[in-house]
Image: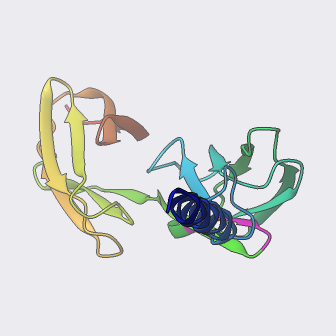
């Protein structure tokens, strides 16, 4: 009886070892550490046209090439011993760009917004009705237009343009600054007529 119990326990241990080994093979081909998927992150969600953004891939196979792309720019780098690869790419085009990392058969993406911002001036002597037009901002993001000590806000709407009207005081000489969330995207020189 004791010999049969010992065989039964050995059989159960053998099955458990085989199950662990088999599960170890069920993972993405290029993932490191095993069982984790490739990811890519950007150091900025919004970036001004012509500005550089840093993309970081995690969980790549160590020592292998990772192909990065952002809009039309592409670059390959080698993942370090921890499965991390990082690259700096320039966001040349305005629009909504898919940042992509490819390692082996795995593909990871994230979205980077390159806003198109323009100042719409009115013909009014007091600059009433002046506005900033912002397109390609992350939906739900906070767009702030700072004119002197006043702040005017709107909400990002993806590829749909958002127009934020403001009043510049008479004799105002300064910058109209446009922020998305907390990041300064651009500044316009504004001079009101006296």
Residue shown at the point (51%, 61%) measured from the top left: 5
User: For residue 100: magenta?
Assistant: yes
Where residue 100 sits: x, y (%)? 64, 66
Where residue 46 sits: x, y (%)? 44, 50
Examine the rendering and report whether any part of residue 77 can be seen: yes
Residue shown at the point (25%, 60%) measured from the top left: 156
Q: Is residue 167 left or right of residue 133?
A: left
Residue shown at the point (29%, 71%) measured from the top left: 161
Where residue 134 sits: x, y (%)? 32, 60
Q: Is residue 126 left or right of residue 72?
A: left
> Which coloring applies here?
rainbow
Report the span colored magenta: 98-104
Identify whether 190 is placed above or below 109. Answer: above
Number of disc labels: 0
For residue 104, which quarter of the picture?
Answer: bottom right
Nearest the eye: 192 or 162: 162
Nearest the eye: 183 or 22: 22
Identify whether 76 is placed above or below 172. Answer: below
User: For residue 175: magenta?
Assistant: no
Residue shown at the point (32%, 70%) measured from the top left: 158
Nearest the eye: 116 or 21: 21
Identify whether 11 is placed above or below 33. Answer: below
Where residue 110 sits: x, y (%)? 51, 62
Nearest the eye: 127 or 38: 38
Quadrant location of the C terminus in the rendered image: top left
Examine the rendering and report whether any part of residue 188 can be seen: no
Dominant SS of magenta comes to: strand
């Amino acid at each position: 009886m004791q010999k049969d119990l010992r065989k039964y326990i050995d059989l159960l241990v053998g099955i458990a070892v085989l199950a662990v080994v088999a599960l170890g093979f069920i993972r993405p081909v290029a993932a490191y550490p095993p069982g984790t998927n490739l990811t890519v992150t950007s150091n900025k969600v919004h970036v001004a046209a012509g500005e550089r953004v840093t993309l970081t891939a995690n969980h790549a196979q160590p020592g292998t090439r990772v192909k990065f792309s952002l809009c039309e720019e592409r670059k390959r780098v080698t993942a370090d011993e921890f499965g991390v690869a990082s690259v700096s790419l320039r966001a040349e085009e305005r629009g909504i760009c898919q940042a992509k990392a490819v390692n082996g058969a795995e593909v990871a993406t994230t979205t980077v917004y390159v806003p198109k911002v323009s100042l719409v001036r009115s013909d009014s002597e007091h600059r009433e009705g002046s506005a900033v037009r912002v397109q390609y901002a992350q939906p739900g993001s906070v767009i702030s237009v700072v004119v002197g000590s006043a702040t005017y806000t709107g909400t990002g709407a993806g590829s749909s343009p958002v127009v934020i009207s403001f009043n510049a005081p008479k004799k105002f000489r300064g910058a109209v600054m446009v922020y998305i969330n907390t990041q300064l995207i651009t500044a316009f020189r504004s001079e009101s007529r006296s």
